[in-house]
Image: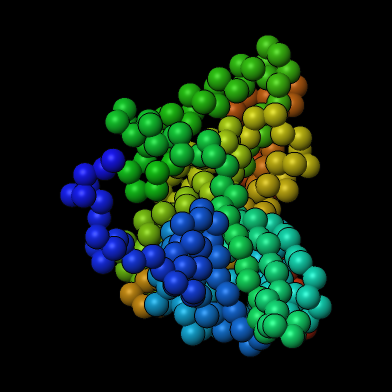
Amino acid sequence: MAHPDTVPHPSAAPRLPQGAELYRALLDQIDDGVYLVDRERRIQYWNAAAERITGYLAHEVVGRRCQSDLLMHRDEEGNLLCGEHCPLAAVIVDGQPKECSVSLRHKNGHCLPVAVRARALHDGAGAIVGAVEMFRSAVAPGRAAVRALEPYGCLDRSTGAVTRQYGEMQAAQRMAEWQRFGVPMGWVRLQMEQPEDLEHRYGGGVLEAAMMLIAHTLDGNLASGDTLARWGRTEFRIIVPGGSQAEVADLARRLAVLVESSNLEWWGDPLRVNVSAGSAVTERGDSLESLELRAACRASRPVPAPARPGDQAETTFFKD
């Protein structure tokens, strides 16, 4: 029999959450981001994982409409989904579950891939009173492994990409694989457009801030085995092992679209960073120089996705 002193008095027992508090406590423990909206898509609840994934705290978003200049969901073509194409808007209309892969804009401005599920919320009578969106990061798990190189001076301090020296070593290894075993290597060249104009308008420091924004967007949307290298003051290169010409070209286009969909806040002003991207895949007799030359010749800016009925207009950013 337990000694009386070891049995807690009922009044000393911890108070468990009740009702809505219990549901909130449970939702704050899961790894998926969760938020609830009413029929006007005004955010009513935002859990802890949503804060972690997006960078927005609950008090910054609760009460705001999700279609405002907030997460700015986009599909792979760069189409803005915050109008009638929003998964939450669709489930509120037809009550049917929706699932899709999109990018969202982090509070810091860069774009991250997420897997989204949307479900309608019903009242006791079965009427739709709102919707819930659940989302989780779709960043490749292996992307964080590059951080282990930091103590050895292999990373660019400003952007977290590998240095050009390390990137050249990786490229040489991939070229050797191509020449000996026939394993193709994709090469993406990404260059900031008119950086001098941007710096002239907004002063020193803006280019490093822009390069950091670009790096975060690129890194979050690459596969585990891809290498992101800072190549110059306003340039990146991406090594893509094993990709076909079509796959690497599509990757270059998608990355450029995502970068131009990002948002750089500079002293309160929202700026869009314009980039060009080109790609090439190893061919017989190639060297790194010839690969770079072909990618440079194919470099272009992404074609903006056409506006569609119901899409919300964006803020006007920096233009060429």
**Colouring convention used in this rendered image of the protein:** rainbow
Q: Does residue 156 appear in the picture of this structure?
A: yes
Point out the residue furthest to the front here.
Answer: 1
Q: Can residue 314 be seen?
A: no
| Image coords of residue 103 (percent x, y) | 61, 60
> Quadrant location of the C terminus?
bottom right
Q: Is residue 198 above or below residue 37?
A: above
- Expressed as whole percent of the image width and height from the top left, the position of residue 161 reads 44, 41
Residue 186, above or below 24: above
Q: As drawn, is 74 to the left or to the right of 211?
A: right
Q: Quadrant of the N terminus?
A: top left
Q: How many marks?
A: 0
List the single residue furthest toward the bottom: 40
Frontmost residue, 53 versus 217? 53
* Quarter-of-image position of residue 270: bottom left
Q: Is residue 95 left or right of residue 272?
A: right
**152 on left or right of 177:** left
Q: Position of residue 240 (x, y in %)?
A: 63, 34
Vertically, is 94 above or below 137? Answer: below
Residue name at image x 31 percent, y 27 percent: 152
Q: Residue furthest top?
A: 180
Res 246 quadrant in image: top right
Between 227 and 102, which is closer to the camera in this rendering? 102
Identity of the residue drawn at 80% across and 71% down? 96
> Residue at 62% of width from left, 68% of height from top?
133
Task: Tell me which residue sits at (38%, 59%) in the image.
Answer: 209
**Whole-percent x and y of residue 249?**
72, 45
